Image: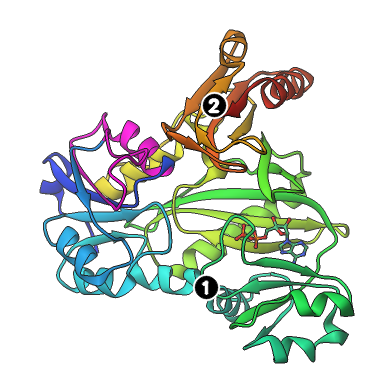
Amino acid sequence: MQIPISYLCAMQKIGILGGGQLGRMLLQAAANYPVETFVLENDPECPAAHLCRHFVKGDIKNFDDVYAFGKQLDAITIEIENVNVEALEKLETEGVRIYPKPSVLKTIKNKILQKEYYRTHQIPSPEFIVTPDAAALKEQLAFLPAVHKLGEGGYDGRGVQLIKKEEDLSKGFDAPSVLEKMVDIRKEIAQMVAINDKGETALYPPVEMLFDPQLNLLDYQLCPAEIDERTLWKVEAIALSVVRNFKSPGIFAIEMFIDKNGDVLVNETAPRVHNSGHHTIEAHYSSQFDMLWRVILGYPLGNTEAILPSIMVNVIGADKYSGNAIYEGLEEVLKIENAFVHLYGKKQTKPGRKMGHVTILSKDKQDLLYQSNKVKHGLIVKA
Ligand code: ADP
């Protein structure tokens, strides 16, 4: 659907489903544009609650709540996939623009459908089989080593189980899941792509990720990823194929593995602003959040180029601390040149909770690594 010209200048009513940090940063970028913002979320103390024009208390998974919220709006976007898609489908038929389209959410929300989507569109992704229950998994000894992924409801590492050998088979999920061949990973990268209503696309430089092996959470993220030109071409071509086949405007983060042979495989796609694009706020001309507003409002796409290379460090709730958050070492981090601190305004910390992030900009990679280590070890979230 093309956005009518008259909309481009008029104040539009735009809703966000979910009020976490992604919604919060989206609202920070909204301040530059003619939008009246709405957030639907159950928790009135959530990170986005105080930055929107209208906070609506409600359940993003509930049909009636999402439908009533959306009926008053010109467009809706999401900050989490786990929303009521049926309500969005009905709103779409009634003329509310949805970014991304509900059909995309349906495919992506369920890892089985998502993996089938890659197969249908010949997008390289780890080989897989579907296991309806625990008994079906137990028959797959010949497929090991593998990774078992819950079809619906898993996030941030919950819902993912490594099944390396026979003894691990009992650790799998007793619910519809995918069993994926284990990839010998050389690098994990993410490619952000924006696509507007006209089908025009904009690609950010891919980022390279490093994970905390215990928490399974993203730890550091370097931009641009250190990959050769041929690999970059593959990454971009694959990411574009993922996005174009969805036939939906929006912004997408495509997480990929580069294996030991240099092959590029799609791990998963998020059809929204994403953790792997946080650095774009300071390090790129148009941030992922600015870009999504441009897409939603029908404006020209922004400039994705990097102003400087960057590293983003997640600020994660320290082990053993639960309760009212205290940020130890914040002053020292704020002294670092070209370090940008984002705290998400979450009152309560708990081990592994994403409480904020810090982006550091520098021309010099050694400097980026040195400063990001200082942040990682110097800024501790206690209670
Ligand atoms: P989530 O959606 O919970 O983030 P992912 O599917 O991204 O789960 O998996 C989490 C992590 O598990 C990945 O970042 C990667 O390190 C590892 N992983 C996932 N799939 C595979 C695979 N097929 N082979 C090897 N490692 C994998």
Q: Nearer the viewer, mark 2 or mark 1?
A: 1
Query: Which of the 4 image quadrants contains residue 241?
Result: bottom right
Residue 80, x across and y down, in percent: 42, 56
Q: Amino acid at mark 1?
A: Glu
Q: Looking at the image, is mark 2 or mark 1 earlier in the sequence?
A: 1
Instruction: Tell me the quarter of the image containing the N terminus.
Output: bottom left
Picture layout, residue 106 above or below residue 38: below
Residue 299, x across and y down, in percent: 28, 42
Question: In which of the image's four quarters is ligand 1 placed?
Answer: bottom right
Query: Which of the 4 image quadrants contains residue 146?
Result: bottom right
Residue drawn at (33%, 48%) of the image: 295
Write down the residue under mark 2. 283
User: Is disc 1 placed on a helix, strand or loop?
Assistant: loop
Q: Is residue 205 left or right of residue 26?
A: right
Residue 75, x across and y down, in percent: 22, 55
Residue drawn at (58%, 58%) of the image: 239
Picture layout, residue 145 above or below residue 184: below
Instruction: Tell me the quarter of the image containing the C terminus.
Output: top right
- Residue 282 in sight from this viewpoint: no
Q: Is residue 110 left or right of residue 20?
A: right
Viewer-nearest residue: 208 or 224: 208
Write down the residue under mark 1. 152
Kindly check if marks 2 and 1 are in contact, taking CB atoms under 8 A apart as contact: no
46 falls in the magenta region:
yes
Viewer-nearest residue: 152 or 337: 152
The local crowd at label 1, few if under 14, some if 14 to 19, many if 20 or more residues have their Cα within 10 Å, is some
Q: Which residues are magenta?
A: 22-51
In three-dimensional space, the C-alpha distance between marks 2 and 1, rounded to whole angstroms, equals 34 Å
